[in-house]
Amino acid sequence: MFELEAAARVAASIGVADHRTAAIDLRVFGGSALTSDIEVPKGRTADEMSHGIPVTYVPARNTIFLSFALAWAEVLDRATSLSGECAGLFRLPGLPAGVH
């Protein structure tokens, strides 16, 4: 819920007239410890964590969210859409090329 609460605070602080949330159940795709029954490994070394895609990476998560935002912008006849992502994600080893 932290992300939703933060989004509402940001929207209110910049005067968004009609902030909305949509229920998007990424469990229909799975592929991540956050969206399916994949266990998150504990006690790994830094070297072990530096190889491969992390099991907590959710495939195309931001792309899916952006597609909803762009659809809403189109309904509102807006020519501009903004997004903000965590810069830390771009430094994680092992993520797919399009994620860096």
Image (spheres, rainbow, N blue to C red):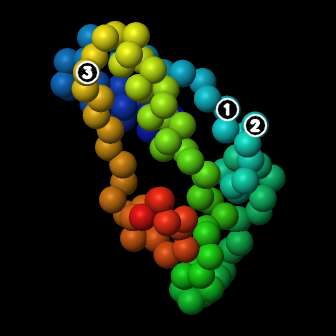
Residue 25's disc is 1
Q: Where is mark 3, residue-wise? A: 79
Amino acid type for the residue under numbered disc 2: Val
Q: Mark 2 or mark 3: name the one nearer the start of the chain.
A: 2
Amino acid type for the residue under numbered disc 1: Asp
Q: Quadrant of residue 12?
A: top left
Q: Where is mark 2, residue-wise? A: 28
Q: Secondary structure at mark 1?
A: loop
Q: Eyeballing the image, is 44 above or below 72?
A: below
Q: Is residue 9 visible?
A: no
Q: Is residue 26 visible?
A: yes
Q: Position of residue 22 (x, y in %)?
A: 54, 21
Between the C-alphas of marks 3 and 1, the distance is 28 Å
**Which marked residue is nearer to the observer: mark 3 or mark 1?**
3
Q: Position of residue 55 (x, y in %)?
A: 66, 64
Q: Secondary structure at mark 3?
A: loop
Q: Position of residue 60 (x, y in %)?
A: 56, 47
Identify the residue shown where x is 36% and y is 31%: 7
Q: Are marks 3 and 1 in contact (CB under 8 Å)?
A: no
Quarter of the image that includes the C terminus: bottom left
- Crowding at mark 1 (Cα within 10 Å: few <14, some 14-19, many 20+): few
**Which marked residue is nearer to the observer: mark 2 or mark 3?**
3
